[in-house]
Amino acid sequence: MSSDGILMAEGFDAAEGLNPPSDLPFKRIRSGVRRRILERLTEGRATVTVIAREVDLRLPHASAELKRLREESLVTS
């Protein structure tokens, strides 16, 4: 992860749901935890520690959820 933290992937608007570029498939985000993380990232970059604190998660859980979001190309670090 960069020292600047994690940010939203291009094409995602948490307020409207996923708006992927035309070459990406549509994905429904069912996890409330991941939706809260993505909503937080609409405010700007953040470290895993900040995200965990602000969405009320333990650090390992936040880290695992961010890993899934990175694997799904919804966030970048």
Image (cartoon, helix red, strand yellow):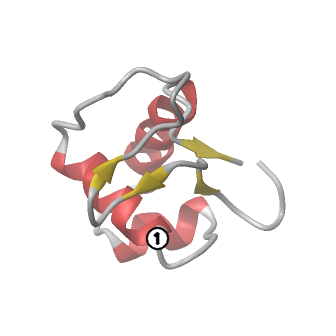
In front of the other: 67 or 59 = 67
What residue occupies the far front of the structure in this picture?
22
* Label 1 secondary element: loop
Number of callouts in the render? 1
In the rendered view, would you say 24 is above or below 5? above
Q: In the rendered view, does 25 fall on the left or right side of 47?
A: left
Q: In the rendered view, does 5 fall on the left or right side of 36?
A: right
Would you identify the image quadrant in which residue 27 lies?
Answer: top left
In front of the other: 76 or 60 = 76
> Within 10 Å of the Cα at label 1, are there few (<14), some (14-19), or many (20+) other Cα atoms?
some
Q: Residue at x 19, y 40 (%)?
A: 31
Label 1, on which residue? 42
In the rendered view, would you say 34 is above or below 20? below
Q: Residue at x 56, y 32 (%)?
A: 73
Q: Type of residue at label 1?
A: Thr
Tell me residue 20's x, y (percent): 46, 38
Tell me residue 53's x, y (percent): 41, 73
Tell me residue 36's x, y (percent): 28, 61
In front of the other: 11 or 67 = 11
Q: In the rendered view, does 1 fall on the left or right side of 11?
A: right
Q: Residue at x 57, y 34 (%)?
A: 70
Q: Residue at x 41, y 40 (%)?
A: 65
In the rendered view, would you say 23 is above or below 67? above
In the rendered view, would you say 12 is above or below 24? below
Tell me residue 32's x, y (percent): 17, 50
